[in-house]
Amino acid sequence: MKHILIPTDFSIRSLRVVHHVVERFGAGEPLNIVMMHALHMPGSIMDLMMLSRRSSHYDLITDDYKEASEILKNKYGSAIRSLKTEFLIGRSNGVFRNFLLYHNIDAIVCPADFNFRKASPNSYDPAALIRKSNYPVHHVSLKKKERTLVSAMSELFEI
């Protein structure tokens, strides 16, 4: 079983990487995919005390993102054993390494031409941590085709 990490900003476009992961890694064994969103460590004692509840972080996940995740799980049900969203809290190499070890990550798959969008003021782009991680990193191209009108869900199924 392969464990794959994909950084996400909770946009539908970030979920498009799942198509490439299934094509590349899903042939022989089931996949566990972790969609990771990175947040800075809280600065105040009260925020740190409330960190264990984590419910406020899950408010960042949009309904479109949740719906698109379910569609992908159903579409690739035979290849994907689990598709879950997790939060990396902290910005150090050690915290990231422990996150990767905890989730048994085998490889990281990132969009090559992705403009990270902050889902909250505490969000950050984990690209620097990923580069320093010494894990296999695969970059996939998510070039958009020219078009005039597109819904958020139709963007999910573009390859």
Image (cartoon, helix red, strand yellow):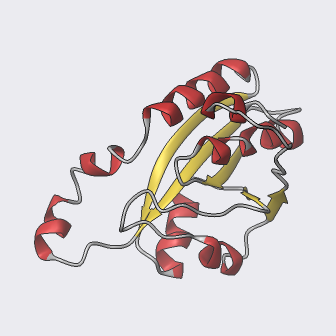
Report the quarter where the N terminus lies.
Answer: top right
The residue shown at (73%, 69%) is 135
In the rendered image, is residue 20 in sight?
A: yes
**Relative image position of residue 156 (x, y in whole percent):** 70, 34
In the image, is 22 to the left or to the right of 33?
Answer: right
- The image quarter containing residue 13 is top right
**Relative image position of residue 105 (x, y in whole percent):** 65, 55
**Relative image position of residue 85 (x, y in whole percent):** 50, 44
In the rendered image, is residue 1 in sight?
A: no
In the image, is 112 to the left or to the right of 98?
Answer: right
In the image, is 93 to the left or to the right of 159?
Answer: left
The residue shown at (72%, 56%) is 106
- The image quarter containing residue 20 is top right
The residue shown at (76%, 27%) is 79
Near-viewer residue (5 or 115): 115
Near-viewer residue (119 or 4): 119
In the image, is 60 to the left or to the right of 126?
Answer: left
**Relative image position of residue 66 (x, y in whole percent):** 49, 31
Q: Is residue 61 above or below residue 102?
A: above
The residue shown at (58%, 47%) is 34
Q: Is residue 150 above or below residue 98?
A: above
